[in-house]
Image (cartoon, rainbow, N blue to C red):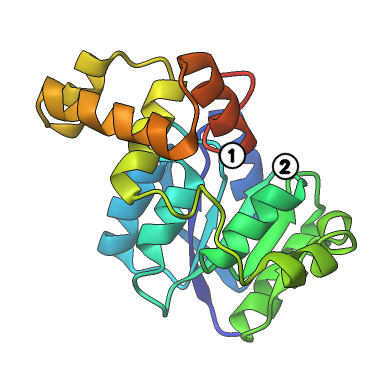
Amino acid sequence: MNTIQVLLAEDHNLVRAGIRSLLEKITWVKVVAEADDGQEAVELVQQYQPDIVLMDITMPRLNGLEALRIIKQNPNIKVVILSMHTSKEYVWQALRLGATGYVIKDADIEELEFALKAVVQGQLYLSPPVSKHLVNDYLWRVGEPSSFEQLKPRQRQILQLIAEGRTTKQIAEELNIGVKTAETHRMQLMQQLDIHDVTGLVRYAIKMGLVSPDD
């Protein structure tokens, strides 16, 4: 195998260190950069242009799925999701957004190496615990965009910030927009999802994988 360059995106320092330690045991893999949130991952991808991005889903500022959407604007960069989540909804979203691999976090080094090798060779890799109950569901749903997919990128970003506990003023400052504009986005988001309270938006964001229930 020729050496491949990997960018690792994971917001927990100890977990990231453990994953990097595994990757360093694979002789043909070189970790060129690390990110601890999705926004930093997007910026480092532009800087380093890695062969593969190995990325968690639940991260602050910009979650892994939204980062994936942006990163895949360059089709030459392959993205492998590395997550503890095995639900069909998470995997289905990742595949629809262009991920070429989905590996669960308790995978051993042999599976991780096999997954990276498969992706480099142009194949799709799914960890067995997710693949066995995903295929039929994915084929059935692939042609039907979900309510989440119909949201605009700005709406998805605001949904994540709301779920992370930001106020309208804080959202406006974070996105560099006016408070009234942020409030308008929030109202349109609620109308489109037919969810009319913050608690409902938080539950929806958790279901869609934007935030973790523990956050």
Which of discs 2 and 1 lies nearer the camera? The answer is: 1
Q: Residue at x 69, y 49 (%)?
A: 89
Neighbour tally class for label 1: few under 14, some 14-19, many 20 plus, Cα within 10 Å: many
Could you say which is closer to the camera, residue 196 or residue 23? 196
Q: In this picture, is 160 found above or below 33?
A: above
Residue 182, given in percent of the width and then of the height, sits at: 21, 27
Q: Residue at x 32, y 64 (%)?
A: 48
Provide the residue designation for mark 1.
Answer: 209
Determine which quarter of the picture holds residue 144. Answer: bottom right
Residue 161, given in percent of the width and then of the height, sits at: 37, 27
Q: Residue at x 41, y 52 (%)?
A: 67
Label 2 is placed on what type of residue? His
Q: In this picture, is 83 found above or below 61?
A: below
- Does residue 142 appear left or right of residue 167 in this picture? right
Residue 65, given in percent of the width and then of the height, sits at: 50, 50
User: Can residue 64 be seen?
Assistant: yes
- Does residue 53 appear left or right of residue 15 in this picture? left
Residue 7, given in percent of the width and then of the height, sits at: 46, 57
* Quarter of the figure with the N terminus: bottom right
Label 1 is placed on what type of residue? Gly
* Mark 2 or mark 1, earlier in chain: 2
In the structure shown, which secondary structural element does the residue marked by tag 2 occupy?
loop
User: Can residue 61 be seen?
Assistant: no
Neighbour tally class for label 2: few under 14, some 14-19, many 20 plus, Cα within 10 Å: some
Provide the residue designation for mark 2.
Answer: 85
Q: Which mark is residue 115?
A: none
Could you say which is closer to the camera, residue 49 or residue 199? 199
In the structure shown, which secondary structural element does the residue marked by tag 1 occupy?
loop
- Does residue 163 appear left or right of residue 71 in this picture? right
State the CA–CA distance, disc 2 to disc 1: 9 Å
- Does residue 146 appear left or right of residue 39 in this picture? right
